[in-house]
C-alpha cells in the first residue's frame, strides 16, 4: 500500500459486502471499484498507481477492490470482460470506467473530473430546494471554468429561482452571443420571461381584474401570466387556451407565444405540457 494512503481509504470487498462497501458508500464519497485478480500482472502494475492517486485526495475518494475470483457475482453484475477494470460510482450508480494500466497523474485527472461532476449534481439538486445556496455552489464551479455553458446555465437557473433575473439574463445574453443557445438555456430563458411579471400582474390583483371583466382577453391573459409566474401552470394554460380559441388573430397571438414560452420552462416529460400542446395543436389546425 502506498505510504500516503490511509488504510480506511482502501477496502477489499466481497459479493456479500459490496452493497455496503461501494454502493451505499458512494452516496457520501466518490468510490473507485477496482476489478482485479491475483494472477493478473497488469492489475499488479495498476495497483500502486491507483493507490497513489486516491491518496492525493485525502479521504474524499475511496478505493474498493474486487477480486474477481472472490466476488464473481459482482464482476458479472458489472459485466467485467477483462481486467484490470476500474469503475467510478457516485450516488449509488456507475458513472464512468477505464480499463488497463494508466499512470497516477492520469488517474488523478480523471478523478478531478468525476468530483466536478459530483459537485454539479449536488448544485443541480440544491437548485430546486435552496436556490440561494445553489447560486454559491454554481459560482464556485464557474470560477474554475468560466466559459463552460453547462455551468453558466446552471448558475442562471439558480439565479432565476432565487429572484435575481437580471443576473440570469446577463448570462443568457452572453451565451446567445455565440449565435445559439442550448435547450437547457432556452428553458432558463423561458423561466426568466415568465418570472418577469409586472407588479400589476401579481396573482391577487390579476385575479380581481379578471373577475371584474371575465370576457376581456387582455386581463385573462394577464391573469394566466401571473398564475404561471406563481407556478400555477394548469389554470394558466387553460386560460391561455381559451384566449387563443376566442381571438386567434388578436390577443390570441400573445396567448400562443405565452404557451410556447411556458412549455419550454417545464420539463419535456411534464404531463401538462403534453396535454396542452395537444390542445393547442388541435386549435391551430
Image (cartoon, rainbow, N blue to C red):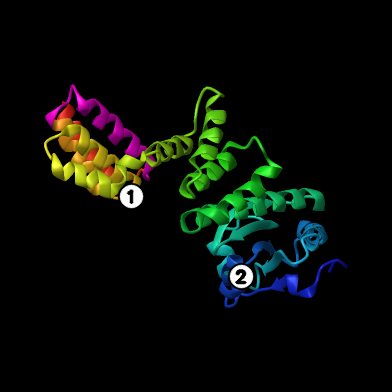
Q: In the figure, is residue 39 to the left or right of 167?
A: right
- Pick the residue in front: 166 or 144: 166
Where residue 184 sits: x, y (%)?
Answer: 47, 39
Indicate which disc residue 119 carries.
none
Residue 190: quarter of image: top left
Q: Which residue is mark 2?
A: 25
Mark found first going from the N terminus, 2 or 1: 2
In the displayed structure, would residue 95 be above or below residue 267? below
Residue 22: percent from the left, percent from the top?
Answer: 61, 69
Residue 83 visible? The answer is: no
**Mark 1: which secondary structure?**
loop
- At 14% from the left and 32% from the top, the residue drawn is 245
Image location (x, y in percent) of residue 212: 14, 43
Residue sitting at x 64%, y 35%: 147
Q: Nearer the viewer, residue 210 or 179?
A: 210
Image point 59% across, 69% down: which residue?
Answer: 72
- Residue placed under numbered mark 1 in the picture: 231
Give the number of the mark in front: 2 or 1: 1
Figure check: 19 above or below 88 = below
Q: Is 21 situated left or right of 58 in this image?
A: left
Q: Is residue 281 visible?
A: yes
91, above or below 176, in the image:
below
Using the image as rendered, state which of residue 30 and residue 189 is in the foreground. Answer: 189
Residue 70 lies left or right of residue 40; in this view the side is left
Q: CA distance from mark 2 to mark 1?
A: 37 Å
Boundaries of the magenta span = 246-267
Q: Residue furthest right?
A: 3
Amino acid at each position: 500500500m502506498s505510504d500516503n494512503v490511509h488504510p480506511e481509504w482502501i477496502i477489499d470487498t466481497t459479493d456479500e459486502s459490496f452493497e455496503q462497501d461501494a454502493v451505499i458508500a458512494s452516496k457520501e464519497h466518490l468510490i473507485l471499484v477496482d476489478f482485479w485478480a491475483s494472477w493478473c500482472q497488469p492489475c499488479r502494475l495498476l495497483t500502486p498507481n491507483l493507490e497513489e492517486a486516491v491518496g492525493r485526495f485525502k479521504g474524499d475518494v475511496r478505493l474498493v477492490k474486487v477480486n474477481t475470483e472472490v466476488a464473481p457475482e459482482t464482476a458479472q453484475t458489472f459485466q467485467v470482460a477483462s481486467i484490470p477494470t476500474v469503475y467510478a460510482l457516485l450516488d449509488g450508480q456507475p458513472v464512468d470506467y477505464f480499463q488497463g494500466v494508466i499512470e497516477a497523474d492520469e488517474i488523478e485527472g480523471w478523478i478531478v473530473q468525476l468530483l466536478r461532476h459530483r459537485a454539479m449534481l449536488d448544485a443541480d439538486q440544491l437548485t430546486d430546494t435552496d436556490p440561494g445556496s445553489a447560486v454559491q455552489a454554481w459560482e464556485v464551479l464557474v470560477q474554475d471554468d468560466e466559459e463552460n455553458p453547462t455551468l453558466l446555465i446552471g448558475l442562471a437557473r439558480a439565479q432565476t429561482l432565487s429572484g435575481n433575473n437580471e443576473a440570469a439574463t446577463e448570462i443568457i445574453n452572453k451565451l446567445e452571443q455565440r449565435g445559439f443557445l442550448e435547450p437547457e438555456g432556452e428553458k432558463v430563458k423561458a423561466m426568466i420571461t415568465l418570472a418577469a411579471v409586472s407588479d400589476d400582474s401579481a396573482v391577487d390583483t390579476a385575479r380581481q381584474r379578471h373577475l371584474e371583466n371575465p370576457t376581456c382577453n387582455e386581463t385573462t391573459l394577464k391573469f394566466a401570466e401571473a398564475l404561471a409566474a406563481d407556478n400555477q401552470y394548469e389554470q394558466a394554460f387553460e386560460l391561455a387556451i381559451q384566449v387563443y380559441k376566442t381571438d386567434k388573430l388578436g390577443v390570441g397571438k400573445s396567448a400562443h407565444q405565452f404557451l410556447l414560452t411556458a412549455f419550454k420552462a417545464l420539463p419535456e416529460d411534464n404531463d401538462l405540457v403534453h396535454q396542452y400542446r395537444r390542445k393547442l395543436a388541435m386549435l391551430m389546425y
